[in-house]
Image: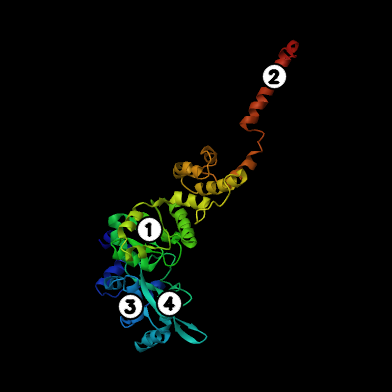
Amino acid sequence: FVMEYEKLSYPEAIEKIAALTNFNLEYDNNDSQVLNTSILDAVNNYYQNNLFSNSNALQYLNSRGITKESIDKFQIGYASSSNDTITYLKNNFFDLSMAIELGIIDSGSNGLYARFIERITFPIFLQSGKLVGFGGRTISGHNAKYVNSPATKLFNKSALLFGYNLARESIYQSNEIIITEGYLDVVMLHQAGFTNSVATLGTALTSQHIPLLKKSDAKVILGYDGDKAGMEAAYKASILLAQNDFVGGVVIFQNAHDPADYVKEGRVDELKSLLLHPKYFVEFALDYIVKDNLGNYRFDINRPEEKQKILVKIEDFLSTLKPVMAEEFKGYAAHLINLHPKYIKTTLGVSSKTQKTNTKKNNYKRPNSPQNQMIDITEILILQGILNYPDKKEI
C-alpha cells in the first residue's frame, strides 16, 4: 500500500514504515544504509534550535517574507560557528569519523572544521523522507552564497530535488511539478499555495534527475531567472526534457525577479498567470539557439553563410528528437530564421554531420548497384540491336 500510495520503491517503503513505527532495521552489507544517519537528524534538530536564538538569521528570513509556519514545515535552521557544531557533536558523544563521512564536518591541516558556518540551513531529504544532507545560505558575506553537503554515500546533489518529499503528494494530485533554482523560491512558492514546487541543488537539471521526474510522469514547468546563467540552465534543461519526452515548458522571470519576489510583493496572481503559460521546451531551445539571453541574434540571418551556421545548429538539435516531435517544430524553427521549412525538412531527423558523412559515402556506387545494372542492361540492348540490324547502325 505504501509503495503504491507514495510511489516508493520496496526498500524506500520499508524504511518509511520503520521510521514511522520507530523500528530499527538491520542491513546486510549495504554501506549506504549502514551509515548511522541519526547523526544527521540530531544535527538538523540542533540547527533548528539555533535559529530561534539567532536574531540575525531570523531577521533575514523575515525580510524575505518567510513565515514561522514555513520555517517549521521545511525545518529551516541555522549553523553558527565551526567550534559550536564540533562542540555539540563531542558533547553528545557522536562518532566524529561518521560525522565526516556524512559531510557534517571535515578534517584539514588545522584539524576538524564544520561544513556549514554562519549559514541558514535547509535539510535535504530523499523522496521517502530520509534526511541525507543540507544546503546552506550565508548571512555574513561568505564568498560562496550557497553551499551544499559534499558528495557522500547518501548525498548526490545531481540526483536530488529540494522539497520533493513535501511536494510529492501535490505533484501526483496536480500532475504537474514546478522546478526552480533556489531553496527560498521553493519555500515561498509553497507558502503561496504552489505546493508542487521543488528546486535543484545549485546545479542544472541533469540526466540523474530524470528517473525521479519519471516516477510521477507529471508536466514539468521550469521557473528560471532571466540572467545569462538562468537562461543557459533553462536551455540545457529544455533539451534534456524534450529528448526524454516530457510535457511542459519554461517560464523566465525578468528584471532580476524570482518566484520568491513575486510572492513577497503580493503578486501571486501574476505569478500564477506566468506559470500557466510556459514556452514549450523545444521552442525555448530553438529560441536560445538563434538568440542570446538579451534577444540578440547570434548570427546575421541576412547573410546566407551565417544563416547556414544557424541552420546546422537547428538541424543538429532537431535530429536528437523523436521524428514526430522534430516535424512538429520545424516550421517554428524556419520562421525564426526566415527560411522556408523545406530546407529544414531535407535533413530532419539526421544531423548535419551525419548527413555530410553519408553524402561522402554515397558518392561511390558499387558496380552491382541497381542504378549501374540499369546502365549495363541498356548498353547491352543497344549493342544487340546493332548486331541484329547492321544496316541501321547510323541510328
Say the numbered circle drawn on residue 213. Answer: 1
Instruction: For marks 3 and 4, give the one nearer the viewer.
Output: 3
First-in-chain label (3 vs 4): 3
Say the numbered circle drawn on residue 58. Answer: 3
Instruction: For marks 2 and 3, give the one nearer the viewer.
Output: 3
Look at label 1 and name its amino acid: Leu
Callout 1 touching callout 4 (CB < 8 Å): no
- Label 3 secondary element: helix
Look at label 4 and name its amino acid: Gly
Q: Mark 4 packing: few (<14 Cα in 10 Å), some, or many (20+)?
A: many
Q: Nearer the viewer, residue 169 or 153?
A: 169
Q: Mark 1 packing: few (<14 Cα in 10 Å), some, or many (20+)?
A: some
Is residue 379 found left or right of 51 in the rendered image? Answer: right
First-in-chain label (2 vs 3): 3
Callout 2 touching callout 3 (CB < 8 Å): no
> In the current view of this chain or complex, which residue is farthest to the top?
391
In the image, residue 212 sits, relative to residue 73, either above or below, namely: above
